[in-house]
Image (cartoon, grey):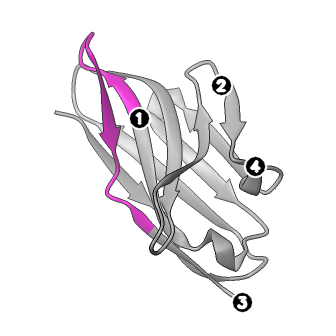
Amino acid sequence: QVQLVESGGGLVQAGGSLRLSCAASGSRFSVNAMGWYRQPPGKQRELVAAISRGGSTNYADSVKGRFTISRDNAKNTVYLQMNSLKPEDTAVYYCKMRIAVPIVEYDYWGQGTQVTVSS
């Protein structure tokens, strides 16, 4: 069984920064793609950023130049550094990982962490 645990959300003023972390734990697994999604109040979940096992990244246009996704393969952890935060970044943020257990791939989601940006 694989579990994802997120941390790092909270309340911040506009222009501030937060760093989210998401770590996978379990046995006999390997992590491939990792990503962050968010779900603003009353809206659908959307992709924020993704990173391949080799380090290739892609970002939603709304966060380009402000957010940075990174990963530590040794720790099975993905990070999201969020700078210059805006009130419209307020959402529940979820990490997602595509994980082979041990060879069949599944998508796993974190529990979600609230990010609130005040104006």
Question: Is 44 within the magenta?
Answer: no
Disc nearer the start of the sequence (4/1)? 4
Which residue type does callout 3 highlight? Ser
Residue that numbered label 1 is attached to: 97
Whether pointer 4 and pointer 1 mark residues with C-beta atoms closer than 8 Å, the reply is: no
For the point 69% across and 35% down, the residue is: 58
Q: Which residues are magenta?
A: 97-113
Quadrant (top left/top right/bottom left/bottom right) for the N terminus? top left
Q: Position of residue 65 (x, y in %)?
A: 83, 51
| Numbered disc in front, either 4 or 1 | 4
Placement of 56 over or under 93, stated as above or below: above
Which residue is pictured at 42% across the width and 41% down the height?
Answer: 96
Inspect the image, locate mark 4, and give the three-letter code of the amino acid beneath it.
Answer: Asp
Q: Which of the marked residues, 4 or 3, is nearer the chain's N terminus?
A: 4
Instruction: Name above or below for residue 40 compared with residue 32.
Output: below
Q: Position of residue 104 (x, y in %)?
A: 25, 13
Q: Residues within 10 Å of mark 2 (few under 14, many from 20)?
A: some
Depth check, mark 4 against mark 3: the one in front is 4
> Quick one: label 2 or label 4, which is nearer the N terminus?
2
Circles 1 and 3, Cβ within 8 Å, touching? The answer is no
Q: Amino acid at mark 1?
A: Met
Residue corresponding to mark 3: 119
Task: Say which residue label 2 marks.
Answer: 55
**Element at label 3:** loop
Q: Is residue 1 left or right of residue 56?
A: left
The secondary structure type at the circle numbered 2 is: loop
